[in-house]
Amino acid sequence: MRYTAKTDIGLKREKNEDCLFARIYDEDNALFIVADGLGGYSSGEIASQTVTKAIREEFEAKLEVLKNGEKKKVKEYLSKIVTDANEKVYSMQTSNPKYKGMGTTLVLVAKISGSIYYISIGDSRLYYVDEKKENIEQITIDDTYVNELLKKNLIKPEEAERHPQKHVLTKALGIFSKLEIKVHDFYKDLGYLILCSDGLTNMLSDEEILQMLLITPIDKVSEKYINEANTKGGRDNITVIVIEI
């Protein structure tokens, strides 16, 4: 396993509200996080940084125990650390006026004793690219109002891309005191995982993301993604982690 990671303010924003964390602890254990503070709200960068730090610290504190845990227990713990992070941000934003309304998305990948798990809240995404770099698949589902409309067959897929409420979230960390956290297994043994904020996916299509991975060495690809997103307008903060599994 190896990775490349980068975050950038983009060309239009005054500050970077994204936050990332990436660390390989050993051959069988690693943690990767992308969090996107809610743009247009108070202290989005505080929310993303708080969540990332809280998850990292709890993960590292319990990693030795987790290495020997059954999958069910590992999932319960991962769910708990994200739940605790949600409660921490919720407490901050409800008790301090300067933090009122802040929140963050989250996409997380954890490798524990060789098994890979992922969590997604909001519209930051996780993609899988096969070993031959022939296909790309979004394996997370955006928690957005438009996706809810699609599920109910109230709009067509082609309408979703240009819908005026495309980026309205139905879930985010820190907004509600309680939040359902689902921990998913990831079963592929070879290929690539891409974690990214919507600052990348709003600028580049899935096919463009795939083609850049195909032609760019992995140690340069996160920088390539950010440069290309900025070339196309850089309307938001851009964060990307690419993992070769």
Image (tube, rainbow, N blue to C red):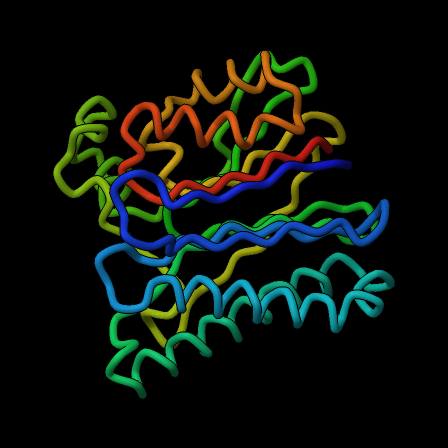
Q: Quadrant of the C terminus?
A: top right
Location of residue 219 (image quadrant): top right
Query: Measuring 48% from the left and 65% from the top, which residue is drawn there?
Result: 49
Nearest to the observer: residue 155 or residue 87: 87
Residue 202 on image: x %, y %: 31, 32
Residue 194 on image: x %, y %: 56, 34
Looking at the picture, does residue 189 appear above or below residue 241?
Answer: above
Does residue 206 appear left or right of residue 151 in this picture?
Answer: right
Does residue 138 appear left or right of residue 242 in this picture?
Answer: left
Query: Hey, which residue is sitting farthest bottom in the picture?
Result: 95
Location of residue 172 (image quadrant): bottom left
Query: Measuring 25% from the left and 35% from the top, which residue is drawn there?
Result: 150
Looking at the picture, does residue 133 appear above or below residue 146?
Answer: above
Q: Quadrant of the N terminus?
A: top right
Nearest to the observer: residue 222 or residue 72: 222
Residue 228 on image: x %, y %: 41, 24
Query: Hey, which residue is sitting farthest left in the picture?
Result: 164
Tag count = 0
Residue 214 on image: x %, y %: 59, 14
Nearest to the observer: residue 124 or residue 116: 124
Looking at the picture, does residue 173 appear above or below residue 111?
Answer: below
Query: Measuring 74% from the left and 36% from the top, which residue is drawn there?
Result: 2
